[in-house]
Amino acid sequence: MGTDLPTMKRYLESLPDGARSYPQCEVKASVLRNFFKGVNTSVLRDALPPVLAAFLEHPSPPNTWISETQTSAIYMASADTVFSSTTFLEHAYQTNYSLLDSNMYRVLFRLGGVRRILAKFGDNWAMFHRGTSATLLRLDESGKGGRLRLQTPPNLIPLLLASAYGTGFRAALEIAGERDVSCAVTSYESDQVIYTLKWK
């Protein structure tokens, strides 16, 4: 590795077995592919150890399940080389919106309606992730807000990535037709994240 990757290193050091941790936790390759579509990753690839650089040099087919730990490490490395924390989150939002509004998934979110999307939150999460779980905790009586919970093995999802996943929840509701959607991490622990959603 020719470049220090402090964010990635802190992430891997927080795990029980570094990049080999939690092999039961996987993510669809389409998520990683979509995140880096159109991005110049040459500096990132040069900085990564070969086992991680291979995910970018030889991308898996979109429907393949790949290691969530290792892809999370790549995201954290990209925050060291390609993005600032602010641009990382903005890029995550744009790519989440693009993925969820693609031909493969658009019908689920455009025709489902917000209540159905939130009621099926766990199932929708499971389309892209294995070994972690997502739950709707509450839908506000106003019908204009709610709370979601993401549960994971300890330290699998660092705070920056948890916030990036929140941009996907925001994008899903916007695709469903809601306006002024916000999704904030309101509680973060090593093994669970609570999100508060609001819209008008």
Image (cartoon, rainbow, N blue to C red):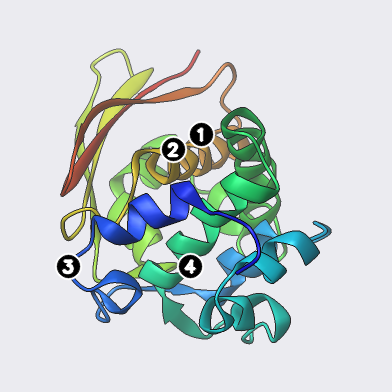
Q: Tag 1 or tag 3, which sits nearer the N-term?
A: 3
| Residue type marked 2 | Gly
Q: Is residue 195 left or right of residue 117?
A: left
Measure how far apart labels 2 and 3 are at the Cα level.
Answer: 25 Å
- Label 3 crowding class (10 Å Cα cut-off): few <14, some 14-19, many 20+? few
Q: Which of marks 4 and 3 is in front?
A: 3
Q: Which of 17 and 67 is in front in this view?
A: 17
Q: Name the residue under label 2.
A: 166
Q: Name the residue under label 4.
A: 71
Q: What element carries label 4?
A: helix
Q: In this view, does 24 lie to the left or right of 93?
A: left
Q: Nearer the viewer, mark 3 or mark 1?
A: 3
Residue 97 image point, x, y percent: 65, 45
| Residue type marked 3 | Pro
Q: Nearer the viewer, residue 189 or 11?
A: 11
Up/down of 141 relative to 117, above or below: above
| Residue type marked 4 | Thr
Measure how far apart labels 3 and 1 are at the Cα level.
Answer: 31 Å
Q: In this view, does 66 lie to the left or right of 156?
A: right
Measure how far apart labels 2 and 1 are at the Cα level.
Answer: 6 Å
Residue 113 seen in render: no
Up/down of 177 relative to 134, above or below: above
User: In which quadrant of the rendered view does residue 133 lie?
Assistant: bottom left
Residue at horizontal 64 percent and vertical 86 percent from the top? 61
Tell me whether circle 3 and circle 1 mark residues in contact (CB < 8 Å): no
Measure how far apart labels 1 and 4 are at the Cα level.
Answer: 22 Å
Q: What element carries label 1?
A: helix
Residue at horizontal 53 percent and vertical 63 percent from the top? 74
Q: Mark 1 points at which residue?
A: 170
Q: Tag 3 or tag 4, which sits nearer the N-term?
A: 3
Q: Tag 3 or tag 2, which sits nearer the N-term?
A: 3
Tell me whether circle 2 and circle 3 mark residues in contact (CB < 8 Å): no
